[in-house]
Amino acid sequence: MASSQLFIILPILAIFVPSVLATDYVVGDDKGWTINFDYQAWAQGKLFYVGDNLVFNYPKGAHTVLKVNGTGFQQCAAPLDSVPLTSGKDVINLATPGRKWYICGVGQHCEVGNQKLVITVLPSSSSSTPSSSPSSWPSATAGPGPSTSSATTSVGTRFALTMVTIAFGMLMA
């Protein structure tokens, strides 16, 4: 009986565990998205995976978040059809692997204030090869408030660990 239940639980875990293990990265930690901050130093040593989220916290109206390409990043210029994120609590899901570039579109914040971020997103552990298609603008929604931690795992992580523990208990029964 326990082994038949295990055959039901394990496939469910295989489907849901990768998505609930996503990490939310609060860009700039407790400083948030602001001018005169070294975002390249902040990103150094962090591993970003497909499914993770970038959380941009800033006072609404003070900054924006724009996704650009490498040239736009170097020139601090967004394409004319770019739609800036402006909520002050912008969450960007990292949906595809590859390089991602973000800048602030307010005044000279990017050029003078160094308000720009470049990261490399790695394929999730559940995917076998990176996508060769160009990345599209990730979805953005209002997200969590400020955090002093650069990376927090979701409540789903606790759920996944609980499910693994249950499955292991059933296997041992």
Image (cartoon, grey):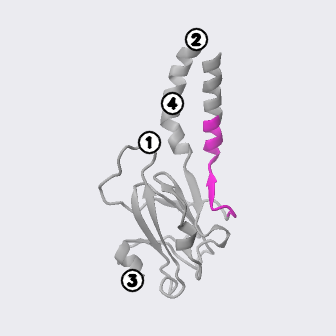
**Disc 1 element:** loop
Percent x, y of residue 23: 57, 53
The residue at the point 61 percent across, 43 percent down is 156
Left or right: 117, with 146 as reference point:
left
Q: Earlier in the sequence, mark 2 or mark 1?
A: 2
Residue position for label 1: 126
Q: Earlier in the sequence, mark 3 or mark 2?
A: 2
Q: Earlier in the sequence, mark 4 or mark 2?
A: 2
* Corner quadrant of residue 33: bottom right
Query: Quadrant of the image for the C terminus?
Result: top right
Q: Amino acid at mark 3?
A: Gln
Q: Earlier in the sequence, mark 3 or mark 1?
A: 3
Range drawn in magenta: 147-161
Q: CA distance from mark 1 to mark 4?
A: 14 Å
The reply to whether dot 3 and dot 2 touch (C-beta < 8 Å) is: no
Query: Quadrant of the image for the N terminus?
Result: top right
Q: CA distance from mark 3 to mark 1?
A: 36 Å
Residue position for label 4: 12
Q: Amino acid at mark 1?
A: Ser
The reply to whether dot 2 and dot 1 touch (C-beta < 8 Å) is: no
Q: Is residue 152 located in the magenta-colored stretch of the structure? A: yes
Percent x, y of residue 163: 62, 31
The reply to whether dot 3 and dot 1 touch (C-beta < 8 Å) is: no
* Corner quadrant of residue 132: bottom left
**Disc 4 element:** helix
Q: How crowded is the residue under tag 1: few (<14 C-alpha within 10 Å), some, or many (20+)? A: few
The image shows residue 113, relative to residue 38, as above or below, that is: below
The mark found on residue 75 in the picture is 3
Percent x, y of residue 44: 54, 66
The mark found on residue 1 in the picture is 2
Q: How crowded is the residue under tag 2: few (<14 C-alpha within 10 Å), some, or many (20+)? A: few
Q: Earlier in the sequence, mark 3 or mark 4?
A: 4
